[in-house]
Amino acid sequence: MGVDPGNSGAVAFYFPEYPQRIAALDVPLANGGIARGTIAAMQIPMVLVTPGKWKKFYSLSADKEQARARAIQYWPASDNFRLKKHHGRAEAALLAKYGAEHL
């Protein structure tokens, strides 16, 4: 699971056994306070990864449109990222993929 903890954040679920699948949805998260509390309350292990670290891995800048374009490359059949406003979904999806493959 990847969480983009911004005010217009999102959550995504990546399935390593089915890498072509991704589930992502918008979830405004009030700067991550609610997300962290929910994850902790459910006793789900959590690893915080800085944007600089995972974006460097994907060769992305701070431009959110780059993250959306990269998500479309990984999941071309998904319509989760079709609109510009879906950049949070894209970042959450890339975080989920990064976590599954590197943590």
Image (cartoon, rainbow, N blue to C red):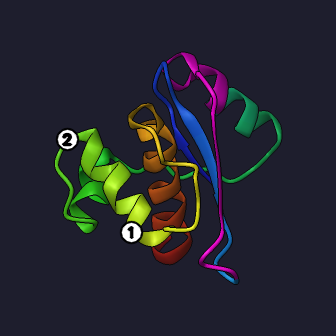
**Residue at 57% over, 36% down:** 10
Give 69 or 55, whichever is nearer the viewer: 69
**Residue at 52% over, 55% down:** 93
Give 6 or 36, whichever is nearer the viewer: 6
Side of 38 relative to 58 (left or right): right
Relative to 4, does residue 70 appear above or below in the rendering? below
| Residue type of the residue flagged with mark 1 | Gln
Residue 14 point in image, percent of width and height: 63, 65
Residue 25 point in image, percent of width and height: 65, 40
Q: Is residue 95 magenta?
A: no
Give 95 or 53, whichever is nearer the viewer: 95
**Residue at 39% over, 69% down:** 73
| Residue type of the residue flagged with mark 2 | Ala
Sequence order check, earlier mark of 2 and 1: 2
- What SS does tag 2 mark? loop
Residue farthest to the right?
A: 42
Q: Which mark is residue 73?
A: 1
Residue farthest to the bottom?
A: 17
Residue 75 point in image, percent of width and height: 51, 68
- Part of the protein shown in magenta: 18-35
- What SS does tag 1 mark? helix
Q: Residues within 10 Å of mark 1 (few under 14, many from 20)?
A: few
- Residue hosting label 2: 62
